[in-house]
Image: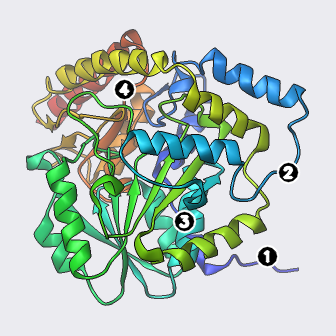
Amino acid sequence: MEKLSPAKRSTELEYAIREIAVLASKIAESGRKIIHLNIGDPVNFDFKTPNHIKEALIDAVKDNYNMYSASEGQHDLRSAISYKLSTQHINISEDEIIVTNGISEAIQMLLGVLVDEGDEILLPSPTYPSYRSYIKFYGGIPVTYETLEEEKWNPSFDDIKKKISRKTKAILLVNPNNPTGAVWSEKIIKEIIQIAAEDNIPLISDEVYDEIIFSGTHIPTAKVANEVPVIGFNGFSKAHLMTGWRLGYMYFHNPNGVLDVIKEGVLKTARIRLCANTPVQKAGVAALKGPKNHITELINKLRIRRDICVKRLLENEIISTNIPEGAYYLFPKIDLSNTKWKNDKEFVEDLLKETGVCLVPGSGFGRAQHFRLVFLPTPAVLEEALDKINNFLRKSLQRGS
């Protein structure tokens, strides 16, 4: 029997963050120590899921809350999410909220409903790679608009306007941004809203890092969107340290019911997959209603770790970087013009093979000549990793001169 051929749509799926981890695993098998600065999972380091959230999950399981639940999410969780949104001055009823198995499922569901063959979605460059892959998976075309590194990764409004076409189905904002850590101001968001309003284009707003802010204030898109429809994504993985629990949600800022058909399509998709994890939804309620001290501690630790990384990376003359205002990523630029590396992927792979330090190439986020570094490890581990990076660059540049 001949080997089966996969569907063409599956052959274009890419996810650089975990693809580099495959190489790291092979290197680890040889006995080399790997320092993982590639995956944004705080629970993998010294940030632990708060006890009140863990206890809520345990109690739910013990109380036999282990059955299938409502496809759109349980009432108490959607009510708690609605309340959280109201504290951000967003009036969203629980009927406009759908609970998902992490934001990844929310992205997959929404794009499956929104995108037909040849449709275009505008994405910031750089951006989280799942969007690009899922748009292609459903036959759509990801169209990137520029964000300006020299202006703290703020978007180019002229480029957004230039990229809009009759095929544009939505404009994506990732704010705070993965991979750059940029946090867009209210003025910037309002400008994008105005552009969208002129062409009757809905907005998709990924806000999963909304509570991890080092400076300034995060403004949810729906708060200032007025009559422009917004589909918001958020979840529990990051601020509530529940990465492996896979709990997220989408909400619909739905003026005049313009998103009703899209929401119904997502609900039909949700019914096909039955439901989000039932006992974990009880833990989600506890996360939203319980104490938030762990978030303050998370931010304080991350600020110290961010500053260590910025200082140490800038010891290299071929590296430049903005200081992130949110999330837990650095996205430095590396000048490879006088080096042996042809591109950022070669640099990252060579660094990993020689030192065991695992980064992600910037091209995996749609921006070449960069890399993403996660500053979640302890200061001691980060210092060790940065020593290795700096020594590696120093030796490589000396050999090349």
Q: Nearer the viewer, mark 4 or mark 2?
A: 2
Q: Position of residue 77 (x, y in %)?
A: 65, 42
Look at the picture and state if 190 lies above or below 19.
Answer: below
Residue designated by label 4 = 375
Q: Which amino acid does label 2 sit on?
A: Tyr
Q: What residue type is labelled 1?
A: Lys
Label 3 to label 1: alpha-carbon separation: 20 Å
Q: Where is residue 57 in the image (x, y as percent from the top left)?
A: 75, 28
Label 4 to label 3: alpha-carbon separation: 27 Å
**Label annotation for residue 3:** 1
Q: Label 1, secondary structure: give it.
A: loop
Residue designated by label 2 = 68
Of residues 137 and 257, the one nearer the viewer is 257
Q: First in sequence: mark 4 or mark 2?
A: 2
Residue at 70% in and 72% down: 268
Q: Which of marks 4 and 1 is in front?
A: 4
Of residues 53 and 101, the one nearer the viewer is 53
